[in-house]
Amino acid sequence: MSTPTRSHSMLRMEPFLFLVGMFVCFMDIPNIPVGGVHLKMPQLVFPLYMPLLLLRYKFRVKKHLTVLGALFLSFLLPSVLFSTNIKISLEYLYAAVISVIIMNSMYRLATQMGSETVELMLWFYRWTVITTVPLVAFRLQERGHYTLYEASYWAIALIPYYCISFNRLFDQGRNAFLWDGLIIVLALVTSSSVSMAIWIVISFLFVAFAKGRLTIKTIVTSGAVIIFLLVGAWIASDRVQSLFQIIADARDWSALPMLLVAAGGNRLQRILIAYRAFVEHPIVGVGPGALLDFASLHYRASDFSIGGMAASDFNTDLPATNAFLELAAEAGIIGFAAFLTLLWFVLRRSAGKPPISPFRISVVVTMLSLTIESSYLRPYVWMLYGITLGLSDACCSDALDHGSLKRILARVIYREDRNKPSAVAGCPPLSKGDSGIL
């Protein structure tokens, strides 16, 4: 009897490492005490990925990604050296190193697996929703958030799922979208998250625009969904009812501060803290991770009232709700410029490749979401950078202008040689010099 070849093996290392990597990147909980600090699972697991993948692929590296990762980390060093809290900043520097390792590792795995990556991603996203349902049903979670801190974080982590699913809808029709559409609705119901509804609608509109399907019908349908969600929010939320009441009672612009506070809660004031810290420390910032400590020591809540109005639950020791301003406040212009350079590289590398458009859109929508959320070092975001770059390098745009996502991205590809990256269907494989971890 002949021995099965590697190309038919279902136990290849890459899919296993990829799924474990996704699972770990979605784990905000638990925080594990290690030597006086608390580490998340990605910070414990991914240090093992880099040497493992380097050895497996004979130390071949991606030069551009190596330089960008090193650039980002080196540009954080001045902020660490001049930090207002060196201990916290060193911890954040380690988290930044892990973020770069996550991006590099997932890049390498996505490059090796090609379109199989998308199949695994879809099944993993479905799994997160299906396993969250019993958590909510048995009151283990009041609002579904899987293993993330809260529902709004889960809403952001699922953005690639929305984009891939809507891309399948436009490429393959309703039947291909049906089950994923139901699972997305299930996620929305279990999370009771307004922000999830927003990112779902925005993802749909962006994908429709990219596919040339942003018609009057699409816009009207999206508008109807938004109105339906607003009506549902008005019925279910006292806060939304008070917001509508403020709008109804407004007679002039003097009601604007009250409206802003009612609409954004303490979010706008938390953004103002980051802005003020950046203005006062524009070059190197207050130090990675040190904004909360700095603000609580140097600012008072009353300094950030808006037209005399303030959210009742606002305090200066809350994280900024804009990841970009947070990064600028903590790392200054130097660190912020390095991050924007990395982000520009991800978007540029994935441009002009239609099958990769759902991932590129995912990056854009995720960046939009981070304008009202905190933390620029979320593991699942850096995972998305790596996967987007990996699939972009596994494909060539010239051969993919008219292909469908099902034919190009959703087909499982096996290889006989594990050192030879698989191409996305219809594209030539990467050259040997263009493959690598970094």
Image (cartoon, rainbow, N blue to C red):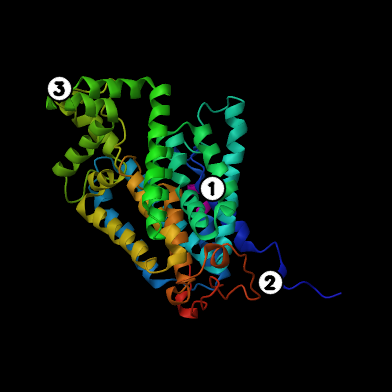
Q: Which residue is mark 2?
A: 7
Write the start and end of the magenta stretch as one range: 42-46
Q: Is 233 colored magenta in this rendering?
A: no
Question: Who's the residue at 42% across and 37% down the image?
Answer: 152
Q: Which residue is mark 1?
A: 24
Question: Who's the residue at 46% across and 49% down the image?
Answer: 380
Nearest to N terminus: mark 1 or mark 2: 2
Gap between marks 1 and 2 measured at Cα:
27 Å
Q: Quadrant of residue 66?
A: bottom left
Rendered-image quadrant of the N terminus = bottom right
Question: Secondary structure of the magenta portion, mostly?
Answer: helix
State the SS at label 2. Answer: helix
Q: Say which mark, if any, is on residue 251.
A: 3
Question: Who's the residue at 51% across and 54% down the image?
Answer: 169
Q: Position of residue 102 (x, y in %)?
A: 46, 56
Q: Would residue 231 be visible to someone looking at this image?
A: yes
- Disc 3 marks a residue whose amino acid type is Arg
Q: Position of residue 275 (x, y in %)?
A: 19, 40
